[in-house]
Image (spheres, rainbow, N blue to C red):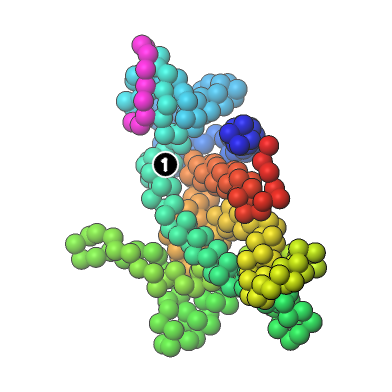
Amino acid sequence: MLKYITKKILYGMLVLIGVVVLVFFLFQGFGDPSRLVMGQSGDSTTQANIRKELYLDQPKWKQFVLYLNDVSPVCFHSKEEIDNKKLKGFFIGGEKKLGFKIPYLRKSYQSKRDVWSILMQALPGTLMLAVAAMFIAILIGIPLGVMAAVKQNTWLDTTAIFSSIVGISAPSFFMGIIMVYVFGFVLSDWTGLQIAGSWFVIAEDGTRKLTMQNLILPAITLGIRPLAIITQLTRSAMLDVLDQDYIRTAYAKGLSKRQVIWKHGLRNALNPVITAITGWFAELLAGAFFVEYIFGWQGIGKVTVDALEKLDYPVVMGSVLIAATFFILINILADILYGVVDPRVRVE
């Protein structure tokens, strides 16, 4: 198991390095970001100072090495760089120190704040939205798929298939607009839901207070497509499992229909469902970008879209790296869960 996990982590690191290369050359490999930082009123001296601060006066290959050194948890930095960048971590050595640090995603062009702090402030909102959306999808999708398989060729099965096709076909941004208009505007007096809002409210003393009311509409909107896919996958997997010999053996031993379906059948049908759940949870972090923007939900998605509008590339680059890291970690977790859920799968 340890060897398997180590191999997966190494593969994940290679993928992440590829993402870093792509992100750097896509957003910083071309053009001159110094003009974006200094604005319209800057002079040539100001631009030269900014270029030096951002390493833009160095060759492209060196710019990339320096960027990789910044975003990597393992790094080499001088004491001056550690103090200037306010790096957090553990450092050893003399003038040039070896460090294990929180990745430094540099500073926003617009607010001059550390990108890491900007994204970490927004991350709870995105995770909260993704977890709520996936919870809704699992809570409804798996039982609905099981019932559709058990009641094959009945009205329940037909309704489940039709609903899932509609859910898969409808883009999240389209469903978001419909949900906003119907439940957040037309029926707002009955639902009590608002068109837009965040996961916190500012109290009179200036502190943040958690509020779940604004989570309902964006979570349902984001959860529609994974719900439809989980329903179809659960139905297909259950139909295959219910035809197996060990299911007939379980009935022959006198087990109840409830035990056979939910204990034996569902457990052996969960592998493709786990793949969908883990894969879609990672994609929800990216899909949340549009939903967050539509609903005004304060998360990484809205922060990133706002940064794109302002050409604030460090924020965009940082959000892509964080999303890629989550995607890799969730897929590693999915591979490990296979062996736990399905005894037929053995991790070598």
Q: Which quadrant of the rendered structure holds the N terminus?
A: top right
Residue 324 picture quarter:
top right
Q: Which residue is mark 1?
A: 116
Residue 119 percent location from the top left of the image: 43, 47
Residue 231 percent location from the top left of the image: 67, 70
- Is 124 on the left or on the right of 335, as rendered? left
Look at label 1 and name its amino acid: Trp
Magenta includes 47?
A: no
Depth check: give the residue in front, 148 or 65: 148
Residue 224 percent location from the top left of the image: 61, 70
- Is 167 on the left or on the right of 330, as rendered? right
Within 10 Å of disc 1 (Cα), the crowding (few <14, some 14-19, many 20+) is many
Q: Which quadrant of the rendered structure holds the C terminus?
A: top right
- Is 88 on the left or on the right of 217, as rendered? left
231 relative to 26, above or below = below
Region rendered in magenta? 85-95
Picture residue at 39% right of the left edge, 69% below the top: 212
Magenta includes 86?
A: yes
- Is 160 on the left or on the right of 109, as rendered? right
Picture residue at 44% right of the left edge, 69% below the top: 215
**Residue 229 seen in the figure:** no
Picture residue at 48% right of the left edge, 86% below the top: 187
